[in-house]
Image (spheres, rainbow, N blue to C red):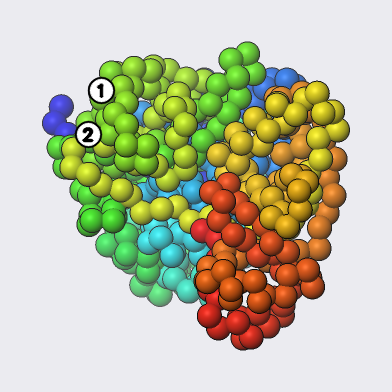
Amino acid sequence: MSLTKEIQKRRTFAIISHPDAGKTTLTEKMLLYGKAIHLAGSVRARRNQRSTRSDWMSIEKERGISISSTVMQFPYNGHVVNLLDTPGHADFSEDTYRTLSAVDSAVMVLDAAKGIEAQTKKLFEVCRDRGIPIFTFINKMDRPSKDPLELLDELETVLRMEPVPVNWPIGSGESFMGVYDLQSQDVHLFDRTSRNQTIAPESITTIDDKRIKYKLSDYEQETLEGQLELIEGLGMEFDPAQVLNGTQTPVFFGSALTNFGVELFMNAFVEVAPPPAPYETETGMVSPTDSEFSGFVFKIQANMNPKHRDSVAYLRICSGKFERNMTVKHPQSGKQLRLPSPYTFFADERHVVDDAYPGDIIGLPNKDFAIGDTLHNGKNIAFDAIPRFDPEHFAMLRNMDISKQKNFLKGLRQLEREGAMQVLYRADTIQRTPILAVVGQLQFDVVQARLETEYNVKTQLEAQPWQLSRWVTGSDADIEKLPWGYGLVKATDRDDKLVALFRSKYDLEHCVERHPDVTFEVIH
């Protein structure tokens, strides 16, 4: 098959949501309808098996949150789907941002009872900034929910884009029985299955089907008829072009738990979602149809398999065809590398792959790659850097067993390479106690848990009062005039760049005003 045809088959997307909106459940049901699994729950079961072997994963289990990204590839209706499940917790938004740099579209999952929540809005803004088309799945219609019209109004008011319903729920809560297709005017009624583990039986009928009148109360029937009449009168038209340019989001209603509406969503999504798009580099755009291979590392994860203690670099392919054993250039090191063991992902499983195409995500055994690194086999290019978030929390991390110092430093280097945190050292003291700088407090817990589980190192955390950090540049004389020691601390990062740590935004603004010859740059 030609390169162009392979590219047109790819759909690479992320799922974004507030915690507990049903993101993991929807992911599993997509796999179920893609026939990648036979029983819903098998992916979660594997994840739970992993969590019994890892304190880090047990944090996810104990707190009911996602803090790690997952990649899964599976076929669906003649397409190749690359699904990236993102962390759901706000403290790990930086990892989510990196994941969103590697996708062509996003599915936004909303809880029908809660609408748009804080983390959803934040992730939506990231997608908007990156020009990523959004598809909306309003989930949990099998539970008491907001009025669908109210949800549409909230989407338009809060997110400032036009929501266009593709289908409409029939009933809600216990009476939710299916959806009305606003384009075909067909009604899709579903039946529940045992434990919701298998594909829901579906019957296609019309809006005047007697089963609807039997299931819905008179009030619900009148409300449904009024809503459909109103939607039709508003003349909302689904326009794929507006979806791709970010002014419109198609809206689907359903219940991932009961499998209602998931297949209809997936069928529409793979037809409308964009194939791999061009990527920007320092020297211009790279088209996926370019014959020369290129890609960039957007994530690094170590110790996915505790038995092997390996490190994996996740590579988004941007152009050309990737082939196993090919030799590529790594501009950051100036080396040429042979890649004999690439693989694709399915949750925590890996499968060696012989070839891959733009849009695909492959794993590479980590050869000291860093997040944002470029790989290519043609003209010299470098993809735009993936920015780091400005840390908001700082703490000293002390190794409690000096005999484990080698493991301690090794673990810190690896976790920083993954982007789990930034490591700083005070430049005005002889003592080399690392300072962790993170976006969210929960990152501290993850770092400590992983150091203990994966490197057998117990640590003690000491919170510090700083709130901001900035790279500092200027002449030595001007830098020395800064009020070091008066709430302002001098530190260095992994590249030995000078970093100033501030206790407050006021302190930063004061320094900027009083020392115009010194530059204070956000760490990126």
Name the amino acid, label 2. Answer: Asn
- Where residue 298 sits: x, y (%)? 45, 42
**CB under 8 Å between discs 2 and 1:** yes
Instruction: Give how far across and how far down residue 478 sits, in percent.
Output: 58, 76
Which of the pair 85/469 is nearer the observer? 469
- Mark 1 = which residue? 326
User: Which one is earlier in the sequence, the residue at label 2 or at label 1?
Assistant: 1
**Residue placed at 43% from the left, 57% from the top?**
134
User: Which residue is depicted at the point 80% across and 23% down?
Assistant: 403
Dot 1 surroundings within 10 Å: few (below 14), some, or many (20 or more)? few
Q: Residues within 10 Å of mark 2 (few under 14, many from 20)?
A: many
Give x and y (percent) for residue 203: 45, 37
Q: How many marks?
A: 2
Q: Position of residue 344 (x, y in %)?
A: 41, 25
Report whether residue 130 is seen.
Answer: yes
Q: Amino acid at mark 1?
A: Met
Q: Which residue is mark 2?
A: 377
Relative placement, left or right, of 144 versus 69 is right
Q: CA distance from mark 2 to mark 1?
A: 9 Å
* Residue closest to the eye, 453 or 362: 453
Q: Secondary structure at mark 2?
A: loop
Outermost residue to the bottom: 513
Q: Is residue 412 above or below residue 246?
A: above
